[in-house]
Image (spheres, rainbow, N blue to C red):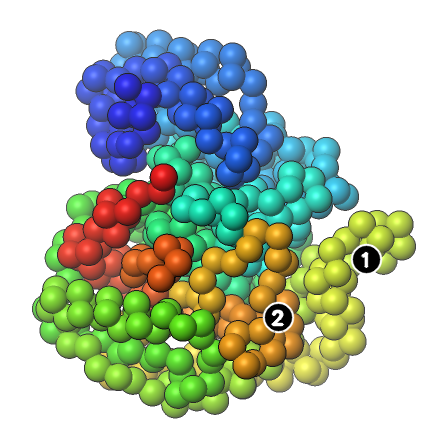
Amino acid sequence: MSDDITRLGALELSAAIHARDLSCHGVMAAYLERIARLNPVLNAIVAMKPPETLLAQAREMDEKAARGEWMGWMHGMPQAIKDLAATRDIPTTRGSPLYRDFLPAEDSIIVERVRQAGAILIGKTNTPEFGLGSQTYNPVYGATRNAYDTTLCAGGSSGGAAVALAARLLPVADGSDMGGSLRNPAAFNNVFGFRPSAGLVPKYPVPEAFIEQLGVEGPMARSVPDLARLLATQAGADPRAPLSRESDPSVFAQPLRAPARGLRVGWLGDLDGHLAFEPGILDLCTDALTALAGVGCEVQAARLGFAPERLWEMWLTLRSCVVAGGRWADYSDPARRALMKPEAIWEVERGRATSALQVYQASEERTAWHRHLLGLFRQYDILVLPTAQVFPFDVGRHWPERIGDRTMDTYHRWMEVVIGPTLAGAPSISVPVGFGSGGAPMGMQLIGAPGADLQVLELAHAYDQATRWVERKPPR
């Protein structure tokens, strides 16, 4: 019975609770039972609240429902928050021993909003230290293991969220994305991860609210309608986030329409040989293009028309600037620096050596890329790239040093395929494309013009209805 409950999608679960077919207490008990059974190996959810506390909160939600006091669509649903987002009643460690006991003074906006929608926070989802790197391990909680093969990694930095979704430990999940952190773990665990347009989901609290525009927060789910419904809760301007978009988030709460037929889809592949891929990834993605054609898209090969190395160089400069600023107080104290992961130290030292002029020039380059991409979107409605350049790798390996005969010169070069949408502030969703010869999942990115979030979600939903990868091979 408990697995029957956790098998429901988030919208199905919400409907069952609101129809009083399921009690909040019964739902919580089912999820806690499954978490107790699977999470000790997967290590997706961390900082769990005591079960008796959560069950008591669920009973309170049932009492509210009995009085007709419905809080929202997530009334009584369990939710765990990525361990980078601030939660006032659960430690926000950021995967670092420096913040092992850090309790923020206030919630982040996305946390406020899911609480207001009725969610019960049960804990956090695991993340790499400071969210750096697409492999979820840290010295506070350890490594998160892939939902399909526990010898493999989960991806990152929203790795705990993706595994919790795939293993049905959560109905939906939040995440964040600077360098593919919503998209990569979604691909590695056969779920959906959506990086929304810059500013659509407001970020707060943050130490700096004007320069840092690379990272966004967004939704993950096992279906696109569930994902869109969570996005409707997360999105919407807030004065505390001065660059947040003035938009109507309710459009994402409506049933997703079928996409217009004849959408022009441009397949960018390996960027004319610039990107290295493990064997099998490009084949899975090109096979998936037939499903896009089957839902009425006009698919053709496309060329980027912008030197990929220019993207990489601006990315390195802007990312190091952001990481150095955010981690400077920790780095400048030798005792704290000694507890930071090498990749974090590398980023800070690179940012420290970068001049303000170099940052400005990188931002000029980013502006040129944004302008160029808008030109591409006059030729195509959607652009497509793989989500990752490697399949999930051994959970004990920090990052891939090589892809084929190519050496990766940084700890994140193997994720270069995701930086284009990040630098443009464009919406990008990772959709499943199937499984490699070793049985590991993979995904591809559907990328829209900045602001075209709904169009991307509508096409992703049509693609999912045609392929049903999440249902065709659930994790063991």
What is the crowding at mark 1: few (fewer than 14 residues within 10 Å), some, or many (at least 20)? many
Disc 2 target residue: 401
Classify residue 457 as left or right of residue 387.
left
Give x and y (percent) for residue 340: 77, 53
Disc 1 target residue: 331
Q: Residue at x 15, y 56 (%)?
A: 466
| Mark pair 1, 2: CA separation | 25 Å
Give x and y (percent) for residue 368: 47, 85
Residue most toward the front? 438
Give x and y (percent) for residue 80: 48, 34
In the image, is residue 241 above or below residue 301?
A: above
Give x and y (percent) for residue 439: 37, 55
Q: Residue at x 27, y 25 (%)?
A: 4
Q: Amino acid at mark 2?
A: Glu
Classify residue 53 as left or right of residue 229.
right
Q: The N terminus lies in which quarter of the figure? A: top left
In the image, is residue 349 above or below residue 360?
A: above
Element at label 1:
helix
Quadrant for residue 424, please give it. bottom left
Classify residue 155 as left or right of residue 15.
right
102 and 341: which is toward the camera:
341
Q: Amino acid at mark 1?
A: Tyr
